[in-house]
Amino acid sequence: MLFFSLGFVKAQEAKITENIEKTYLHTDRSTYFLGEDLWYKAYNVNATNNVLIDQSKILYVELISPDAEIIFRNKTKLELGLGNGDFNLQDSLGVKPGTYQLRAYTNWNRNFGDDFVFKKEIEIIDVFQDKNDVSTVKNNAEKGTANSKLVPKQNNFSVNFFPEGGSLLESVSSTLGFKAVDRNENPVEISGEIYNSDNELITNFQSVHDGIGKLQLFPIEGKTYYAQIKSASGDFRVELPKVLKEGYTLSYRTFRGKNILSINTNEATLAQNPSAKLTLNFKSKGVSVLEISQVLTETNFSFEFPKDKLPEGIIQITLLDENNKPHCERLVYIEKENDLEVEVFADKTIYQPNEKATITVRSQSKSGEGKSASFSLSVTDTNGVEDENYESNISSYFLMESDIRGKVFHPSYYFDETNSKRLEHLDNLLLTQGWRDFVWKTMPKLDENKKYSIERGLTVSGRVKQVFADKPLVNNNLTLGLMGGKNNGVFNTTTDANGRFKFENLMISGKTNMYLNSTNEKGKFSGQIVLDSIESYPMTVRLNKTTILLEGNSNVLVENVSQKYIAFGVKPENMLKEVKVKAKKNNVNSWYGVPDYTYKVNKIEANKYNNFVDYLEQELRGIVNVTYWDIVGKDLSDSSFAVLIDGFEAVSGDQLAWVSPDEALQIDVVSGPRILALYGKGTVVSIFTSAKNGQKKKLVPVYAVKQEIEGFYAARTYYTPNPEKPNPELDKNAAFRNTIYWNPYVHPDKIGNTIVNYFNSGVETKVKIALEGITGSGIPVVKTCFYTVKK
């Protein structure tokens, strides 16, 4: 191989691009049993450099059933790009056994398409389900399995060939990648032979990892080529890609630790373009980071490209001519040695059941200085499953999976530092699946109208119009009241020239009662409020509705968990499913909290009066002045107090006449500055009834809106049992729990250390400690270790 000096090298300034976000969820496990909890930690980063980004404040996390139904949807609060939450996997909440999709995205990233949405498959199992059920037992040989080395029947798998750099070229030695997958995109190991159009054998080939491999081919002028695939059910033929007469190819090799890139062409092309001015453009996540220009005077130009000028991760190298027309492309992976050493270890290798464990996490530079980072820690019972499944983790996702389209089988295999073949096999993956499709091939474009905005909090918006016309009301005053838990507050704004209003960046947690009204410049209730949707509708669910059969490991898992439950007295016949008993109830829900005065309506006494107003006058004497003649037939806007009927403000005293003493349940009297801000009056008389919905609707004023809204999900705290301070109610399932400990926020101190403690379960088992996270400079980190619990 000849090496030429660089014609011209320059590091481009990164183009100013939109801050595209990318999200990863670390879950405590990937397989769960009905009745358990799923815990997650969210990492939201700038997609171009993997640094945590403080931009969107709301992350939508959804659990999607095998039937493409969104079972749960959490609005997870993000602070400095971090958040956490959980799902309770109860069958009474609609969860059934099967393969589910965990999905996460911000409203902002909906502008850039489905490629920037985090997705992860999780399995939910009923441990007491009939083991002969075909939906949970791997008994369909035609489907194949993820770990199977057997070749399925013909037509049940496909083989594709991918010329390096994009095309095969006459008289130019080329690398040809290939990949074989079944109908579920699981790899199939294959072998075969390459023949030319004269049926002459050219070479043999065989996959080397997960159905992927490569071979060398020197296309001869005038010849075509095909592959004869060998399978258990017989051979079949696959035509190779067309061979071009002119053009360029781009090839990549590692040679004695050096990264060698080659531009190749043939004499026919060189004769047409004897001194072609070519440019190699290096991009990382759509942003140009390096350019190399060269005048090509020979059929081959090879050089070592400067690794130090490129970021870590997948690099897209494109060859362009002097008219900026692309000719070929190659994806390569750049791995860098970071000045970072992260460790996680337990204080013992063997513990007694229920014994306290101490775990140390250390994040430091190689010289011992502390490195800032945010980690999440999951400690789980392996339940007898010893094999490494190489599922997705934060390193494989941010550095590789999220940059190429399609399913990557066993993604973390390529980031296991103990695997000496990982980079070679990763290059084969990029040669095939990376050739097929690549997320950043075209930089995502944002519509100038920005259909989806960056959410820094919840937004309540809408418009105010005339009641019997669509004419907007300008400068109307809007008062928003939030009542419930920690979310109490009153906010004000006015409508603009289009009658629109907006309350932005509201930090609301859990269920909150919202009261919104509109008044004109004179303070009189005015107009009709037309409210926008409080939150965007979820993204469309796209699932491949194929039956996912459990692998052998899952059968071992079910067997071990079943035995564990039985050992602790949890028998199938004692596992009663949760039952909800429903009955009619006269609900009295006050959005304002504890009132100053409360009166339970005595129906016998109330029916002694001619009307409900007279009853009010008697009950509220000395509190507010209510008389029939001052109320009935009058406009209540001039009254000294406001009247609410089932939460809606009455505008006329006649509305009190509609209330039957038999329907009335409770009367509250509330006063204070918050009431004054909402109603312009210092006191409210609130009446609750058992009236039917049809009767209540006529009380709803168009100038007011009262409804319950859902704020940020209030994440639960993982309960860690403590034998020294037992809690019988919470500890009843702790002895045989499958997630032994979960901590979403493990943050090293200034010197890079942190220590966590918990108590082990009561089971003799092997325990896995999984640490995932990201440093302040955007380096994803994955560390695991194991210990044993034994009597």
Image (tube, rainbow, N blue to C red):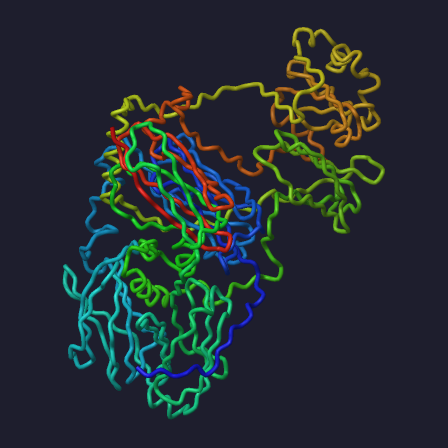
Q: Is residue 747 left or right of residue 512?
A: left
Residue 25, how many percent across, how many down?
Answer: 44, 46
Corner quadrant of residue 197 = bottom left
Q: Is residue 411 above or below residue 285?
A: above
Examine the rendering and report whether any part of residue 702 can be seen. no
Residue 202, how many percent across, how many down?
Answer: 18, 77
Q: Is residue 478 left or right of residue 396?
A: right
Examine the rendering and report whether any part of residue 11 can be seen. yes
Residue drawn 40% across the image and 65% down it: 334
Q: Nearer the viewer, residue 272 or 532?
A: 272
Residue drawn 18% across the image and 68% down it: 192
Q: Nearer the viewer, residue 11 or 358?
A: 358
Residue drawn 42% across the image and 90% down it: 273
Q: Nearer the viewer, residue 488 or 523?
A: 488
Q: Nearer the viewer, residue 234 or 507?
A: 507
- Residue farthest to the front? 367
Residue 439, how many percent across, how many down?
Answer: 44, 62
Q: Is residue 21 above or below residue 730?
A: below
Q: Is residue 453 above or below residue 676?
A: below
Residue drawn 85% across the image and 37% down it: 522
| Quarter placement of the N terminus | bottom left
Corner quadrant of residue 486 = top right
Q: Is residue 696 left or right of residue 353?
A: right
Corner quadrant of residue 518 = top right
